[in-house]
Amino acid sequence: MISDFSVGILLIALAAIMIFFVWSRKAQKKRQLLHSLFLSLAAAYVSWIIPLIIMRFVPTDNQSLMYLLDCIMQPGGALCSPIYLCIAITFVSGNEKLSKWIKALFVFPIATIIISWTNPLHSLYYKQFSVVRSEIVFGPYILVSGALNYLFLVAAIIYMIRFGLKNKSALYWKQCILLTVSGLCPLLMSIYATFSGKEVPITATPLSFMVTLLFCGIAIFQLHMLDIRPIATEHILNAISDSYLVLSDDGLVIKYNRSFEELFAREYGITVSKKLIDCIRQEDVAQKSPVYNMIAALESSRQCETHISYEQAVTFTAGETAIKKHFVVDISSLEINGQISGFVIIFKDITQLRDSMKRLQDSQERMMEQERFAFLGQMIGGLAHNLKTPIMSISGCISAAEALVDECVDSIGDDNVTEDDYREIYDEMRDWFSKVKESTAYMSDIITAIKGQAANISTDDKVTFTIDEMLKRSQLLMRHELLGSGCRLNIIYDKSEEISLEGDINNLVQVIGNLLSNSIYAQKQTGGGEIEIEICHDESNLKILVKDRGTGISPKVLDKLFKSMVTSKGIMGTGLGLYISNAVIRSKFKGEMWGENREGGGSIFGISIPLEMIHIRKI
């Protein structure tokens, strides 16, 4: 028999479900598959318990009406277990559409419904019907029906447990526990009713499914724990960040991932359901500056209503070792209907990137140093020649001066040598000494130029120098190479202007020297000739152009200029020259380089330097 207590509980459940149906109809205009399955489960449950409640008020001797109510009750009882299995499968897969094989599961409960409705024809379901459990005599199909219900419930529970063991996320574990418990209640009740041998009321199984309905309903609609959106959001946040933290609009800690917990939460005492400002103490400012910086950036984001991004260095202690990491911290506000409802803070670990950039910078500096010495190596052969000429000139001047001294000494006491003769000798000596000064000045310029180029390229010797000084040094360093190749240099620029730059003159001399060396190599193959250096400027840039009439640049090499290490000199070239020159112009002078073929043959290589780096004065 059905007790009044059971009926009371079922009536309360029925009223709650009806209220829920009304609410869900208004609150959810577009439902996900998981929501629809839950509503289907609730509808099946209602169709199950309504006939059961009516049975309480029908006389027990009215077997016909009782059997009719039992037939009406069968669809609900047969459908609850497979619908619960569909909820579990949908949660694990995240699909928004049931596959064909899942839909095929409903063939079995439909068969059960049909067999129970047509039982008088074959007695497969009941051999003897009664509302008293001990008086019922079941037919053979009840074994099939019971086995199917067990199979559906066990399959759903195993499905959830496997998924929970495979995914270690705390969010997944909570979801799996809710679904697993909601299936275990009707399963254990069915096992008890079948194998205990005790009298179990007909309302026992429907009451156990009430737990299933309650747990799933709270999870799906109240906590949104089975909603695919927070799961997807968590996946996205984990994919685009190394750590993340979600805060409410007033700074309450709502959520963070495991990486944030290991790196920050444990270190700085940050916990869920506690305000971020309360997780630190005032006396801990020095140790917890990353958290204070975070709070300050949050306040800036709130006041300015904008995205905040900054770099933060954090030192962690691993045993006795201190590890320093660098993060880019991005703070974005979360808005609902134009109002800030919270913040998401994303931490991106850039420690490895910074280390890689440092190694790249060190490697580039080594390459630039090597290229500088390669450039010096090309000039060593001409250095002896450059110094040989002034040395021989000085030697000749000294010999001539010595001869004049000897002549003066020999003429002492000679009455034929007048004062005017001595003055003539002294003037000749001054001329020779003047030539000695010119030669020594030339040698000094050569040594200064070589010394400047031999300096370490990594030093940042910023001074103000003129274009004339740069051109003079370049000519001196390339003089021997120009003469040896039969080339001559023609410099074209407006001499009414004095153009000065701030930076390291040796850097620019190296670049010009490299361009001149390339032009000499290209033009030497065509018999030498004139190489032009043209200097001009417009409203935004100073341009230095090196033009030759050589063989030009092949399209294959032209496409890769300045982008990778390429050379057209075969084994004679390193491929570093233009690559390093471009790096020097970009890093030291904020400029850029380009190359193109010259109309009529040859090539043009250009350097463009912003006028903000230049000072122009009219002479």
Image (cartoon, rainbow, N blue to C red):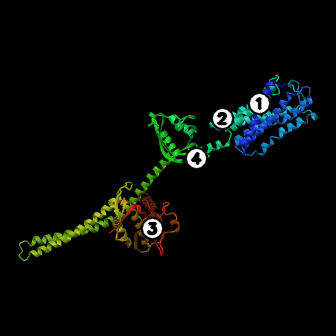
Tag in front: 1 or 3: 1
Q: Secondary structure at mark 4?
A: helix
Amino acid type, label 3: Phe
Instruction: Report which residue position mark 2 lands on.
Output: 174
Are dots 1 and 4 in contact, CB under 8 Å?
A: no
Return the residue at label 4: 240
In the image, 142 versus 380, the foreground residue is: 142
Q: Earlier in the sequence, mark 1 or mark 4?
A: 1
| CA distance for labels 1 and 2 | 27 Å
Residue 262, numbered label: none
Q: Is residue 100 left or right of residue 243?
A: right
Local SS, label 2 = helix
Does dot 1 land on a helix, a strand or a loop?
A: helix
Mark found first going from the N terminus, 4 or 3: 4
Mark 1 closeness class: few <14, some 14–19, many ≥20 residues within 10 Å: few
Residue drawn at x 82%, y 35% as measured from the top left: 47
Disc 4 to disc 2, C-alpha distance: 24 Å
Q: Going 48% across and 39% down the picture, which residue do you hit?
A: 292
Left/right of residue 429 with respect to residue 345 in the rendered view: left
